[in-house]
Amino acid sequence: MSNPLSSTKIRDFGSLVSEKEQKKMVIKNATEFDSYIERKAFDETKEGVKGLVDAKVTEIPRIFHVPKDTLTDKKPSVSVSDLEIPTIDFASAHVDTASREAVVEKVRYAAEKWGFFQVINHGVPLNVLEEVKDGVRRFHEEDPEVKKRYFSRDSANNRIVFNSNFDLYSSTPSVNWRDTVTCYIAPDPPSPEEFPVTNQSPNHRSELQIAIAMDALIEYSKHVMSLGGLLFELLSEALGLEPEILNSMDCSKSLLMLCHYYPPCPQPDLTLGVSKHSDNSFLTVLLQDNIGGLQVLHQDSWIDVPPLPGALVINIGDFLQLITNDKFVSLEHRVLANRQGPRISVASFFSSSKHHNSKVYGPMKELLSEENPPKYRDMTIKEYTEGYFEKVHNKTKAEKKIQLRQVVKANAFDETKEGVKGLVDAKVTQVPRIFHIPQDSSTDKKPSVSVSDLEIPTIDFASVHVDTSSREAIVEKVRYAAENWGFFQVINHGIPLNVLKEIEDGGRRFHEEEPEVKKRYFSRDFSKNKFVFNSNFDLYSASPSVNWRDAFSCYMAPDPPSPEDLPMACRDAMIEYSKHVMTLGGLLFELLSEALGLKPEILKNMDCLKTMLMICNYYPPCPQPDLTLGISKHSDNSFLTLLLQDDIGGLQILHQDSWVDVSPLPGALVINIGDFLQLITNDKFVSVEHRALANKEGTRISIASFFSSSALPNSTVYGPITELLSDENPPKYRDMTLTEYTDGYFAKGLDGTSHLSNFRI
């Protein structure tokens, strides 16, 4: 794992990461979406890991499984097995100058060489230590229904929060085997009235136990604050500075306490209590019980931090490494899972990360010189922390990962099961932040002047079956459009106007049904549902923003759903329209085959026509259309797409580096080349990026029909068509299966980048 501190270094990022690594996509396997479903199901129990143990699980769920390469270094190497982190006795810290200087020297050595040390005779009474551990245990072992009243993922509006894995909905490779209670103690300690204890509860004993636990936490925190002040004095002196320098920088101002509970694990070799990480704090004070499991990464080996009765573990955080310009080191550490337990620990973080703090931190000027120039740029705690939570444990490309904060908001939006229309029905006047597109995406909303008079080709299919010369003329137009535009409109395509109108009306009828009707079809699991309604298929992907649209999806071929599987509002219209689309699709693949100079049946023989997915998009009017998009820039993971759009407009394609409007043409269908067809034609045909704008006008309806086998089992290997290759035109793409391509496409979501480029040779 890369230390998040490295992103603040004064050096060129490109020099740290090879070109190959920068270009490599994060390809997630086919179980990634299942992982989200399993994480959400686990979270919704609100019982945490202890709930699994209480259910007597003998095999841990797969979301807890750590990657295999993590399992090979569970123990310290032999060469360092006899090493221990330093232990420092604070008994003489206030006796006399010489004694204090001796303690300071030990602190300096530990902070510079280890980043970790244990302290004894620290001034926190043993009974206080025991009571807070007992209190934490009492809370976590309370009746689940009592704990559920504290369950939340919103620490901004709750002083005390219980949950499991703060980063549950991030892109971490696995979930950790622990539950946690979180409480901000300083600078504004919660009053007793703020503790979420309700006297109306029928379980007065449970409430009393929790009240006692909170009292123990408050008492312990007073001693930790006092000890923190002393630690920052000693660390200041270890830097050769005045004792108050770090305290005066507000290093000890804020205190966050995390009370961890690690239940016994039936398969401890498959998971971790806490993944490898460094702390986003100035300093951390850890109280651990006698179970053990904490390890620090020292000299590239894992070193056990064995429990020492009455001791506290101290470790340097990232902020302190930054402001000391690497004089002190923030060390990566982790916690093993084990069959014993439960393990209890209380981590106290001195950090202003969750409180408004505009203070700018950088390497301390007193420590800098020509020989020791600054190694980090200045930053605020807020800026660092946002990057830390973007990265979370084990993230290596934060800009490509799901942001925890956005996921929580996306999850809340998703759980309404009413989509974007639910927001409009609620009469929102401001677009929620999760829909806001990055600023650089909002600067090119309109086509440039130089291409404002351009239109995608329109091809009349009326004479396609008249005679050979008429068909050849149409084939030539299709070839030109497929090679130069990737998009074209077709008229006189054979689908009756009343069929087009009915599918538009049917789609609108469904989307404007009562919310309770639509909720019966709400799902993100295509494997168990023929017809699926939701908003943003890539809601939990790495897409930078959520789009202003809802959609329903249904596979209409090769195995069409039974009428009973479809909603009444659009049932007949979908069945009738799909029949015509399949016929037109067959004709299109014939014409495209001929445009390649091949036999008419070649693309159909490759199963390009075999599967058809129908998606009906619903774009409600948007109160702030300049802040969001109906659908982000993307190309289609299909062979070919047929789009029926109403008269509202908003579709744009990227042509000659400018956005060109695809104006609605009554009775026409929009056809576009998909990524799969560009790949198998070896770039003869082009899959063009496109998007849909949001707008204030009426609701926009579009029905997209994708000819693609992407979401159904298909072991067929696709690569550039052999007949198109030569010495002058060698293959430009490697072979792949549609499943392989689609897994990566859905993992990245509509993030504005091309997935096809990852398959280039």
Image (cartoon, rainbow, N blue to C red):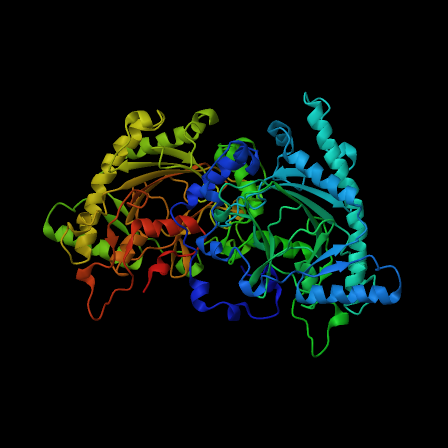
- Horizontal arrangement in the rendering, residue 96 relative to residue 450 (left or right): right
Residue 131, given in percent of the width and then of the height, sits at 74, 39
- Horizontal arrangement in the rendering, residue 514 relative to residue 468 (left or right): right
Is 599 drawn above or below residue 108 in the view shown? above
Residue 243, given in percent of the width and then of the height, sits at 83, 63
The image quadrant where one finds the C terminus is bottom left
Q: How many marks?
A: 0
Is 117 drawn above or below residue 514 in the view shown? below
Residue 747, given in percent of the width and then of the height, sits at 42, 49
Residue that extends furthest to the right in the rendered view of this protein: 96
* Residue 735 position by quadrant: bottom left
Asked if one can make out residue 197 in the rendered structure from this viewpoint, the answer is no
Residue that extends furthest to the left in the rendered view of this protein: 467
- Horizontal arrangement in the rendering, residue 190 relative to residue 77 (left or right): right
Residue 755, given in percent of the width and then of the height, sits at 38, 56
Q: Residue at x 28, y 28 (%)?
A: 562
Residue placed most toward the observer, 571 or 472: 571
Asked if one can make out residue 384 in the rendered structure from this viewpoint, the answer is yes
Residue placed most toward the observer, 681 or 720: 720
Is 335 drawn above or below residue 421 in the view shown? below
Is 230 drawn above or below residue 191 in the view shown? below
- Horizontal arrangement in the rendering, residue 736 relative to residue 186 (left or right): left
Residue placed most toward the observer, 477 or 759: 759
Q: Residue at x 88, y 60 (%)?
A: 95
Residue that extends furthest to the bottom in the rendered view of this protein: 370
* Residue 94 position by quadrant: bottom right
